[in-house]
Structures are given as structure tokens and as C-alpha cells.
Amino acid sequence: MSPDPKSRWVWYDDERVLGWGSVAMVIIVWEVAARVSGVSSLYLPRPTQIVVSLIEMFRNGGLIVDLGWTLYRIFAGFGLAVVVGAGLGIWIATSFRVRAIADMFIAMLYPLPKVTLIPLLVIWLGTGGPFMLTISFLGAIFPIVINTVLGVRQCDPGLVLAARDLGASAQQIVRRVLLPSAIPSIFAGIRLGLGVSIILVVAAEMVVGKFGLGARLYLSGQILETEQVFAVLIVLATLGIVVTKTQDFIDKKLGRWRLA
Amino acid sequence: MTGPAVAVEIDSVGLTFGAQTDAPTVALQDVSCRFEPGKVTALIGPSGCGKSTLLQIARGFLEPTQGRLRFVEIASDAETSRPAMATVWQAFNLFPWLTVLENVAFGLDLAGVPRAERDARARKAIAAVDLNGFENRFPRQLSGGMRQRVGIARALVMEPDVLLLDEPFGALDAQTRLVLQEQLSKLVETSGTTAILVTHSIEEAILLADKIVVMTARPGRVCDTIDVTLPRPRSYATTHEPQYRVLFDRIYGLLRDEVMRAMIIESEGA
């Protein structure tokens, strides 16, 4: 919401100033409070200590490698889920039989918290690459499938008729009408799916990983390196911001898909 | 028009929805009429009389439960295959993610027409509906009247033997409607295509059609067929001709009772 047009504009009435400014305020208050109260940095390290630790972790190389592992695990499974999820979603939406079958499986598996699958997946796949790929894939695929189905089924039947009238084959209707009209919905699913993938991969790393941000987070906590715990959290938060803003940007680019 | 002259014949067609259920709906009953090549035939009737349904049957999107559809070649009087058809829709049904040019070129693209030829033909059709300069706009950036001109261009670019017009101006305001009626009338005359026009508007039927088929309330049957011999080109001024008044009164007289009946049917069905 933009400010009331009648009120006078002031310099801080800017989305970025308010957003970043309040983050800066919290950090300053934190720093001052931690210094004044003299609380042990074992419980609450000061922001300056965390930054030093963060730079140190990046400099001796460890954190970059961990970040790389985590990103790789997230996006390998997520990428697969986008392709499989959108394809499966279209199939479910256009075929009565497939829908009837898939409905049951989705109803069973979608509400199941995917972290509960970690023990079983470890038994089946071990703790290596295939396990991470599967957990990331499972996190992303349900929101993508469900949103693709919704998007395709919400397509204006008039558009399908118009395409048929202009000579479209069944395959052309899927590719040229149903898919593009479902794009905004598919992207909403991709957004949700990527969020779940990130959560699951980091959680899985915490449980079984030797590398990756989750593993680093857990190990740092075990040895009471609280600055390092915070440093990893900052990396994760930054990852979240980058992902969200990138998706906002793509959404804006796809604005022309949206109906009037 | 590309092929030989072909008439579309609706032969004792009936359509019942839900025939296997307890409450079947008879949409059409024993409808026979003929759409002559190169002529504009209007289907007019009260709401729910099945005139749009009849159009869908002519297009082949709905199968009649009785009777049949025939395509008759005029020269030989022999039955032939379905002529090329294209539809202009009441709700426009433009693809919102495509530009005006891409919308108009859509059918040609599906048919595999090479890009250069496809674009040239689409641009010509866009010019024919006076939309030059709007090729790269998206449908949502256009007014209702402009959107329907895109719809008309998208159908005409396919050079159909039969143009199906399903209440093409039903969603437009009265003034836009008048202007587009004149424009469409000219386009249909110059293209020489057969046209079937479904409309609620007596005025539209008289201004555009060579023949008007008046239908009854549900179940839809043919109530009367009226030839319109008013000279062309017709325009708004035509509505002042005495012959226009006579036709209007005659059709209104036929429709009035049917519209009353349709209202009763609708209130009973509710």
C-alpha cells in the first residue's frame, strides 16, 4: 500500500527505505544491546562478530563449497520436478482416467510432511546424491502438479473451441492453448515448490549430510560455534531473498500472460 | 472463397440433451434449412431457442441426435465433403497471450504456412478491418469493438468457404455495433463467402442477411423463412426505408409471441 496521497511526502516514505532501514535498525539495536548487557557470545554473538565469522568462513573456502552443494542438491531435484510436474499436470488435467488415478495418490501423498520420508529414503537410497535429488524432487513436485492441473482446468473453454475452429489438433491445443494459459498458475506452483525444496534439502543435510549448509549449521551448533550458526543462517536468508526476488522479476516479465 | 460453390443443408435435424436421463432437454426439433453459397443467412429467435446450438452442429462440434447435415455442391447437386469454415465468437475468444498479429496468424501457423506468407496475409486481414498500427498490441489493450475486429480478421484470414457468426456483436455497445455491422457487411460482400449469422437483433439480421430464418422458443423449430431483397450496400440509412419497416414489423410480430413463450419456459425451468 502506498501512503495516503493527502499526507505530505517524507523521505522515509519509500518502500526500500522502510524495508532496509528497519533491518538496519534491528541490527544496530542488537549490537548495542549485546555490548551493553554483556551477554555471552555463546548465546548471542554480536552482529559484528557474526560478520567476521562469515567472512572467515568464506575465506577459508568451506562455506562456498557448502553453498555449492546445497544449491546443486536443491536445483537438481527441483529442475526435474518442474519438467515432470508440468508434464504430469497437463496429462492429469486432460485425461479423465489419469485424473481419477492420480487424484488418489495426490490426496494421500500431498498432505504428508515430506520430512517424514527421510528415514525411509535413507534406507532405500543411502545418504548420497540420489537421496538428496529425491527429497528435493518430492518437495517441489506436488505444488507444481497441483497448480498445473488447476491452471489447465481454468483455461477458458472458448479459447479451446476457437483453436479447434482454426484447425488445431489435440496436441496443438495442449501446446498452443492449454499450456500458455496455465503459465501463471504453473509459476505459482514453481514458487511454492522451490520453497519446499529448499526447506527439505537443508533439513535433510542437517540429519544426514556431511557437506552443505544444513550440515554446516548442525555441526556448528554441536560445537557451540554460535557465530557460525548465525553466519549460515544469514547465507540461507540471503538465498531466500535472491530466490524470491528472482521469481518476482520473472513474474513481472510474464505479466503479458495475465488476462486483462 | 476457394472451393466450388457448396450449400450447407440442415436436414430434419433434432438435438436432445440427456436423452438417457429422466429429464431430457429437447434443444432442436425437426429443423430444416439451407444456407446458400455466397449468401448471408441469419438465424434469429428468442434466448435458448438453440440457434447457437444449430451453428455448432453446422460447424461439426456437435452431433445431432436426429436428422443430418449435408454439404451439396451446386454445380453437380452432389453431396461433397465439409467446406472450410471459420467462426467469429460473441466472447471474441482471442488468445490473451498473443499479439493482434499472432492471433490473426494463429490458424495459418497451425496449418504450417511459412512465416513470411503467414505474416503478409495476417497484415492484409488486419488492414481490412482497419486495425493497422495495432499489430503488436495485446487483446487486453484494445476496446471491445477492436477486439471483435481482430476476431473477424482471424476468421477471414483463413479464407473460409463458410463464415459462422455467433452473435458477433452481442457483447458490444449499440453504437459500436452499428459501425461494425456496416463494416462486416462490406467485408462479407467483397469476400463472397457464405455466412451464417446468429443474432438477437432484428436490425442486424435485416442489415446483413439475404435470408432470415426465424426460430421458435425451445424446442427450436423453424417458424418462418424470410427473404431480404433490400438493395446493397446497406447501411444505417437503410433502416429508414419503408421496406425495412415492413420486414422489421413482420419479424417482430413472429418473434414477440415466441419471446413471451421463451420467458414462460425459462421461468418454469428455473
Image: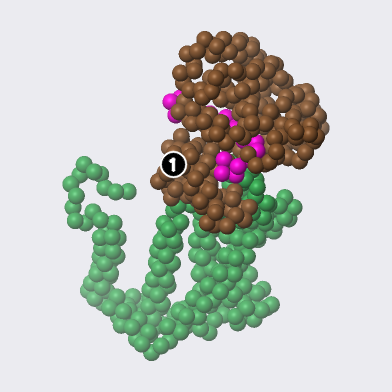
Q: Give chain B's shade.
A: brown
User: Please, which chain is the residue tagged with disc 1 on?
Assistant: B
Q: What residue is shown at x 51% (from left), y 43% (from top)?
A: B125
- Nearest the camera: B207 or A110? B207
Q: What residue is shown at x 57% (from left), y 22% (from top)?
A: B205
Amino acid type indicated by mark 1: Leu
A60 sits left or right of B170 in the view: left
Q: Which chain is green?
A: A
Total numbered labels: 1
Instruction: Name the residue that disc number 1 marks.
Output: B131
In the rendered image of this protein, does residue A130 appear above or below residue B189?
A: below
- Report whether residue B265 is seen: no
In the rendered image of this protein, does residue B65 appear above or below residue B127?
A: above
* Magenta stretch in the rendered image: B156-176
Q: Position of residue B129 (x, y in %)?
A: 48, 38
Residue at the far front: name it.
Answer: B75
Residue B171 counted in the magenta span:
yes
